[in-house]
Amino acid sequence: MAAARARGNVGGRPTVVDEKILRMARDMLPNPENSITAIAKMLGVSPGTLYNHIPDLRELRAGGIPQQLEGAER
């Protein structure tokens, strides 16, 4: 594995999520009319993928400010 990594091969399945998809999902999450499943379907990913890539998903869903941003705003 170390030799493969040194050659630039990291293995595993390539991700389908990029910054554009994450940004669109984050923009849609606070709207209560959009379910997680509906957002995932619109973006062409699974709901689990959204949960895996957006750690503050539940806070965004509730319309609150993510904990990472609270400290930055003070």
Image (cartoon, rainbow, N blue to C red):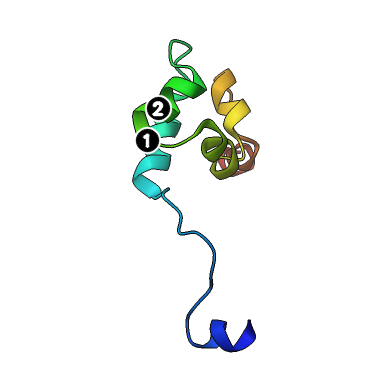
Between 5 and 73, which is closer to the camera in this rendering? Answer: 5
Figure quadrant of the C terminus: top right
Residue ID for mark 1: 44
For the point 62% across and 42% down, the residue is 68
**Which labelled disc corresponds to residue 71?**
none
Residue where numbered disc 2 is placed: 41
Location of residue 63 in the rendering, given as x and y in whole percent from the top left corner: 54, 20
| Gap between marks 1 and 2 measured at Cα | 5 Å
Discs 1, 2 touching: Cβ within 8 Å: yes
Most distant residue in the top direction:
33
Where is residue 2? Give x, y as percent: 63, 85
Q: Which of 74 and 8 is in front in this view?
A: 8
Give how far across and how far down residue 32 sits, in percent.
48, 12
Residue 65 in view: no
Q: Residue at x 49, y 23 (%)?
A: 37
Asked where in the image residue 61 lies, by quadrant, the reply is top right
Query: Dot 1, how many residues are within 10 Å of its Cα: few (below 14), some (14-19), or many (20+)?
Result: few
Q: What element carries label 2?
A: helix
Q: Is residue 14 above or below residue 63?
A: below
